[in-house]
Image: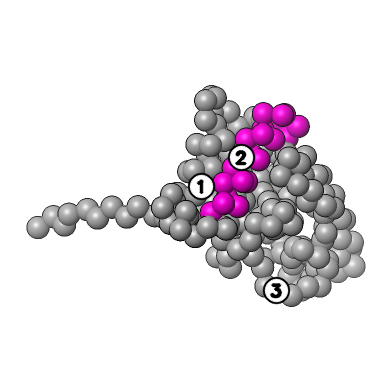
Amino acid sequence: MGDNALKIPKDQIYEERKRELERAIRIAQREWENIGVSLELCGDIGRFCKSDFMIGIIEEDIIIREPLISPTKSVSGYSPTFYPMYFVRNLLLMDQKLPQYGYKTVEALYVFTELVPKAVERLGLLGKFSMAFGNGYAYVRTGWIAEKGNPWEREYFFKMFFKGRKVDYDWDFHWTSVKERLKRIFQKFMEWQNDPNLYAREIKPRVRVKPMMV
């Protein structure tokens, strides 16, 4: 049997990837709505908009990208979510693992670090503050840490969210206690954004210099 007999026609690959893309978008919409529920005391994040994200699949020379948008993004280019095919794969794998692992997966981490910053941008949190909020949210949702951003902001988010309660990542987006905690954290991030001096006092990295061994 020759190599040509084993090749899958490009149009078949395209249709398969297109179906995957459509499923990934539905998953993203579902999680956007979940995020919106959890943040409803902070404001209304509105409907999921595909054009806010670089969503697509690249398979050899088959490229599907929906929609076609500017390559500029709010996430670091070093992040595995920067390229469109990774966001789609993370969405699909997160959903596949959800029945067994819940949201405690690396894929869920990257999904929430992609979605949450855009959600809070709609509520007025911008730049490094929206990114930091997204990193913190993803941390308390999944138990995994995104190695980007300021670790002090992420730790502050974690401590505020779990203050006075057992650390348990299996919380529900609809819980009133979750909404109230997220509201308090969001308000603090807004205070930092609006008052650079307050931010500098409360959260700027505390650099600890270790003595050199000679």
Mark 1 surroundings: few (<14), some (14-19) or many (≥20) residues within 10 A: many
Q: Residue at x 69, y 53 (%)?
A: 120
Query: Which of the two marks, 1 or 3, is nearer to us in this view?
Result: 1
Q: Give amino acid for label 2.
A: Arg
Q: State which tag comes first along the sequence, 3 or 2.
A: 3
Q: Is residue 188 magenta?
A: yes
User: Residues in magenta?
Assistant: 172-192
Q: Tell me, yes or no, whether the two marked residues, 3 and 2, touch with CB atoms within 8 Å.
A: no
Mark 2 surroundings: few (<14), some (14-19) or many (≥20) residues within 10 A: some
Residue 184, label in figure: 2
Q: Nearer the viewer, residue 43 or 166?
A: 43
Q: Is residue 210 above or below residue 171?
A: below
Q: Residue at x 57, y 51 (%)?
A: 191
Residue 18, label in figure: none
**Which corner quadrant holds the N terminus?**
bottom right
Q: State which tag comes first along the sequence, 1 or 3.
A: 3
Task: State the separation of the CA atoms marked 1 and 2.
Answer: 15 Å
**Which corner quadrant holds the C terminus?**
bottom left
Q: Chief secondary structure of the magenta span? A: helix
Q: Which residue is mark 3?
A: 71
The quarter of the picture where residue 99 lies is top right
The colour scheme applied to this rendered structure is one colour
Task: State the separation of the CA atoms marked 1 and 3.
Answer: 27 Å
Q: Which residue is mark 1?
A: 154
Mark 3 surroundings: few (<14), some (14-19) or many (≥20) residues within 10 A: few
